[in-house]
């Protein structure tokens, strides 16, 4: 004799098996090494690196004015009101190059997200006589989230620091 509602029992058995497997597997996913788990990526990270590396390459080739103009464009340091501050920064970099010699290479140290609107990027620029740590602070207005018309939010450079003191690496 056939059991009434046999198909209902079969469906419940299958659903119970799926739920049991899910409950057993999910906790074990946290035990995987960090490198195996999916890591969040920042689509803008490449944008920062491209801008910074183009800046360093331009500095390596010669006069720093075009390099600074391109890097500072769109941010508070690229406005007419900040010309004096920007010029002072350019002179500091020129003095640095005079004291430390030619730029040999550069290397990215790290990228640090601070909330959703600030990203700090650090590089070390190797001169002939001494390395220099550069910190770039990028800012994105909270209202400039990606949309169909503007798929990439606008990040602007708001601060730029460099330091010959290697304690800044600690």
Image (cartoon, rainbow, N blue to C red):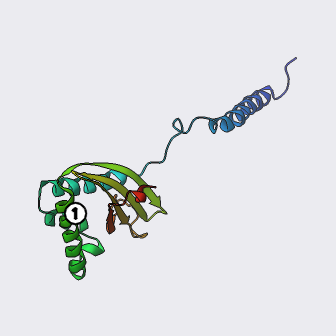
Q: Is residue 163 left or right of residue 128?
A: right
Question: Depth check: 108 or 102 in front?
Answer: 102
In the image, is residue 103 above or below residue 138? above
Which element is circle 1 on? Answer: helix
The foreground one among 10 and 27 is 27
Instruction: Residue 70: name its quadrant.
Output: bottom left
| Residue at x-position 35% and y-position 59% | 148
For residue 121, above or below residue 91: above
Left or right: 32, with 45 as reference point: right
| Image spot of residue 65 (x, y percent) | 14, 67
State left or right for residue 62 relative to residue 151: left
Image quadrant where one finds the N terminus? top right
**Could you say where residue 3 lies in the image, as x and y percent from the top left?**
85, 23
Q: Residues within 10 Å of mark 1 (few under 14, many from 20)?
A: some
Dividing the picture into quarters, in which one does residue 17 lie? top right
Which one is in front, 8 or 128?
128
Q: Which residue is rendered at x = 68% and y = 38% of the image?
A: 27
Q: How many marks?
A: 1
Closest to the observer, 50 or 62:
62
* Residue corresponding to mark 1: 96
In the image, is residue 16 above or below residue 112? above
Indicate the position of residue 75 as horizontal and vertical percent values: 29, 71
């Amino acid at each position: 004799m056939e059991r009434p509602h046999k198909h209902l029992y079969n469906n419940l058995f299958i659903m119970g098996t799926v739920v049991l497997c899910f409950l057993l597997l999910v906790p074990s996913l946290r035990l995987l090494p960090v490198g195996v788990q999916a890591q969040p990526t920042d689509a803008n990270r490449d944008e920062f690196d491209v801008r910074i590396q183009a800046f360093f390459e331009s500095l390596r080739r010669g006069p720093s004015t075009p390099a600074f103009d391109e890097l500072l464009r769109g941010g508070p340091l690229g406005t007419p009101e900040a010309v004096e501050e920007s010029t002072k920064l350019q002179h500091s970099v020129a003095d640095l190059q005079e004291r430390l010699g030619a730029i040999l290479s550069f290397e990215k140290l790290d990228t640090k997200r601070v909330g959703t609107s600030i990203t700090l990027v650090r590089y070390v620029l190797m001169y002939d006589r001494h390395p220099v740590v550069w910190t770039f602070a990028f800012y994105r207005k909270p209202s400039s989230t990606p949309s169909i018309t503007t798929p990439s939010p606008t990040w602007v450079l708001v601060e730029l620091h460099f330091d010959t003191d290697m304690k800044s690496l600690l």
